[in-house]
Image (cartoon, coloured by chain):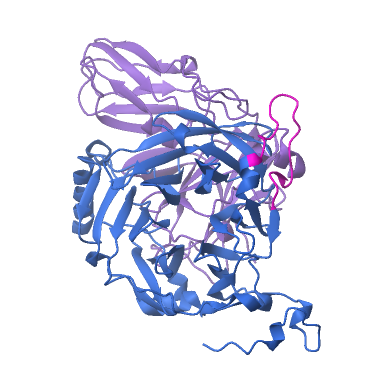
């Protein structure tokens, strides 16, 4: 069987009408007997898409070009180590597949019992990922869309497991790039870690001088977030509000870190910041 | 496209009050977890719409099955109500068996009738249907004949979020339980690792009490604040209504209902552990007709089912927690008795003598069947290699003297 490996360094993915730029390594394995065509579903992107991700990454999002069938994940998606050996039971078996309403985005939860260092499952069978090791999330060429059309090409999303991130999310560690008044330039938040793209788009809001949340589009890139307002920025004090349940890719939130004994209700944390928009 | 806009407009209308009422089934966008109240109201979890629906089933829908034989409990003989269940559902819906999903099953206790939630199709436009079983025959329930209302429980598209397309976050409803005029709804978010439980009065008034639950997780040996509940039931323990919940990584937790107030953050008492490498499927309550004890049964993906007496749950001490406690790897805590059930996909009780399952056939796991199980031993002789089944073997209980079962 001929296997062609091809490195694609830059992929433009159209996700929910937004153009998201991501980079990652994808290997294509051409298969005899199945030929992709224009209608074949494609795994367009994945989050986190960084070459190095925390060894305790909890959640992956896989974005497909087409609406996909439910009921295939256990059979057609797996994790391999650098030698092509499958990693045993990497994902939490929930009994339900976590798709978005259009069934184009799949959420995969890494077994939390294996992530938490020093605990039962972690000690019994080890962590899913080992630091400094290389892995691939593999999507079978037989993963089918709702019209039963297979992807036809096996996709391998490779990454390296980096240091664990175990601290709670801390807004005071974020950097900001402020736009100028009179423009619609993006307000940019640079995170100190890879944030979950789902919650970071949904749990951050920017409030204008009248106190109301500004309308606009959030585009999350993991390590940074852009907010494009519908209206021009105006001079004055604005407020950034963050829901304390926002998570990074390792499941740490502002209120509770994933790895440590958290205390429910500990809300004495920074979740709002004021910034001033000035003329350019 | 027009259809999509129509649904969106409806969803926005619902937002005004959080409750909708009508006489049809047009609101059902998906059909998952099922539950009945004490009468004829069928609750249907609709993860796609972020709602729970309530259908008040009337006599044109309900059919009393009390006279229909479920087998012979005295001789531990269950009955296969429907063979090749997936094939028969597919035939009824005019599709192929690999194009359907059987999402949940519930028994209407007063009439002993089985209802199923099914999707015709595996894509986002899968058509949700509710099926009933009438004397072993599947029927599509015409929900338009039922009085209907529903309430919001999960993320629903808003005017603002729809400006940039369909939101991606959703809540998969894993279980619904009715108790004393309320439903409790558990679910799993596709964007947050949370353990929020929703408590909703019925009839719906548009209010949802949401509680965050912290549990002590023995397998993890640390506080675990955000494991999702997979299955749950409400039982009275020493007269105190109590939620008994089983989590994804299998702790069993006990929480008095009184503590589940809106916005509250409570710590459930972990009293047991179903063991690592296993996921719970269903928890059901039943009374042991032999000794009148009250119990729950938990079915599992990778272990046999476990029976737990309610008395043991009441008396169980919290499992040790805090610094220095070593992790628990196996079944632990409250006493559990393994029951001979595996490959069970869905389970509910019918009465004190019978439960009904959707399961993989013990001899041919490629076959899905609806089969009854005699209680309280959860044991069907035909499923097992037991001496009493052999020709010429001793028959101390007189099973062989019983005439062959005919239906």
Relative image position of residue A201 (x, y in whole percent): 38, 32
Q: Quadrant of the N terminus of chain A?
A: bottom right
Q: Nearer the viewer, residue A60 or A119?
A: A119
Which residue in the rendered view is the most extreme toward the front? B291
Instruction: Chain B: give its colour.
Output: blue
Q: Quadrant of the C terminus of chain A?
A: top left
Over which residues does the magenta segment extend?
B315-336
Q: Nearer the viewer, residue A207 or A112?
A: A112
Q: Residue at x 28, y 45 (%)?
A: B204
Relative image position of residue A217 (x, y in whole percent): 30, 32
Relative image position of residue B28 (x, y in whole percent): 29, 58
The quarter holding residue B218 reads top right
Q: Nearer the viewer, residue A27 or B251?
A: B251
Q: Nearer the viewer, residue B11 or B326?
A: B326
Q: Taking B231 as reference, is B323 above or below it?
A: above
Instruction: Chain A: give its colour.
Output: purple
Q: Residue at x 43, y 69 (%)?
A: B114
- Left or right, B262 with reference to B392: left
Q: Is residue A211 visible?
A: yes
The quarter holding residue B17 reads top left
Magenta-span inclusion, residue A204: no
Q: How many marks?
A: 0
Q: Taking B140 as reference, is A185 above or below it?
A: above
Specify the principal SS of the magenta part: loop
Q: Taking A234 as reference, is B215 above or below it?
A: below
Relative image position of residue A251 (x, y in whole percent): 54, 33
- Left or right, B389 with reference to B217: right
Which residue in the rendered view is the most extreme toward the right? B393
Q: Is residue A111 visible?
A: no
């Amino acid at each position: 069987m001929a296997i062609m490996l091809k490195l694609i360094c830059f992929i433009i993915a159209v996700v929910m009408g937004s153009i998201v730029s991501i980079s990652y390594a994808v290997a294509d394995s051409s298969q005899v007997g199945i030929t992709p065509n224009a209608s074949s579903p494609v795994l367009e992107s994945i989050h986190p898409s960084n070459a190095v991700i925390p060894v305790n990454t909890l959640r992956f999002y896989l974005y497909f070009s087409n609406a996909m069938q439910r009921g295939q994940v256990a059979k057609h998606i797996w994790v391999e180590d650098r030698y092509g050996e499958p990693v045993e039971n990497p994902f939490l078996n929930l009994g339900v597949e976590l798709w978005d309403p259009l069934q184009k985005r799949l959420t995969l939860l890494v077994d939390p019992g294996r992530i938490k260092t020093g605990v039962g499952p972690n000690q019994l069978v080890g962590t899913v990922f080992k630091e400094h090791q290389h892995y691939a999330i593999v999507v079978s060429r037989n993963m089918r869309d709702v019209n039963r059309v297979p992807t036809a090409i096996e996709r391998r999303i490779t990454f390296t497991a980096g240091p664990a991130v175990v601290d709670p999310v801390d807004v005071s560690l974020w950097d900001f790039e402020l736009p100028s008044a009179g423009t619609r330039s993006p307000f940019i938040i640079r995170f100190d870690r890879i944030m979950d793209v789902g919650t970071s788009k949904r749990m951050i809001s920017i409030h204008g001088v009248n106190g109301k949340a500004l309308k606009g589009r959030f585009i999350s890139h993991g390590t940074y977030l852009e907010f494009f307002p519908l209206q021009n920025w105006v001079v004055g004090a604005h407020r950034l509000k963050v829901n304390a349940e926002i998570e990074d890719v390792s499941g740490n939130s502002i209120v509770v870190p994933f790895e440590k004994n958290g205390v429910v209700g500990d809300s004495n944390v920074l979740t709002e910041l004021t910034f001033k928009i000035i003329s350019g | 496209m027009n259809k999509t806009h129509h649904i969106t407009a409806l969803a926005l209308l619902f937002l005004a009050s959080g409750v909708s009422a009508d006489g049809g089934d047009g609101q059902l966008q998906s059909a998952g977890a099922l539950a009945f109240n004490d009468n004829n109201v069928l609750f249907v979890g609709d993860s796609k719409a972020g709602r729970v629906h309530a259908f008040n089933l009337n006599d044109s829908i309900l059919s009393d099955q009390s006279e229909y034989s479920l087998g012979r409990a005295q001789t531990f003989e269950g009955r296969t109500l429907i063979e090749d269940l997936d094939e028969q559902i597919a035939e009824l819906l005019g599709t192929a068996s690999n194009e359907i999903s059987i999402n949940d099953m519930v028994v209407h206790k007063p009439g002993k009738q089985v209802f199923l939630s099914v999707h015709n199709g595996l894509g986002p436009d899968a058509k949700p249907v509710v099926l009933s079983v009438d004397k072993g025959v599947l029927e599509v329930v015409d929900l338009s004949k039922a009085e209907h209302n529903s309430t919001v429980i999960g993320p629903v598209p808003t005017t603002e979020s729809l400006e940039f397309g369909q939101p991606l976050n959703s809540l998969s409803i894993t279980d619904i339980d009715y108790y004393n005029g309320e439903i409790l709804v558990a679910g799993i978010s596709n964007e947050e690792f949370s353990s929020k439980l929703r408590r909703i009065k019925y009839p719906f008034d548009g209010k949802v009490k949401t509680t965050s639950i912290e549990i002590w997780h023995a397998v993890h040996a640390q506080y675990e604040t955000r494991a999702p509940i997979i299955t749950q039931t409400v039982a009275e323990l020493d007269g105190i209504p109590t939620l008994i919940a089983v989590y994804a990584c299998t702790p069993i937790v006990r929480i008095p209902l009184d503590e589940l107030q809106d916005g509250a953050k409570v710590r459930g008492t972990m009293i047991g552990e179903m063991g690592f490498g296993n996921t719970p499927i269903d928890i059901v309550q039943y009374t042991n007709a032999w000794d009148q004890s009250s119990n729950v049964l938990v079915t599992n993906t990778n272990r046999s089912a476990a029976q737990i007496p309610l008395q043991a749950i009441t008396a169980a001490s919290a499992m040790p927690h805090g610094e220095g406690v070593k992790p628990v790897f196996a079944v632990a805590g409250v006493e559990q008795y393994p029951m001979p059930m595996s490959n069970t996909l869905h389970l509910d009780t019918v009465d004190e003598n019978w439960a009904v399952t959707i399961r993989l056939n013990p001899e041919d796991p490629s076959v899905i069947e609806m089969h009854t199980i005699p209680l309280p031993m959860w044991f069907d002789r035909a499923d097992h290699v037991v001496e009493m089944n052999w020709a010429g073997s001793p028959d101390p209980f007189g099973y062989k003297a019983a005439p062959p079962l005919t239906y």
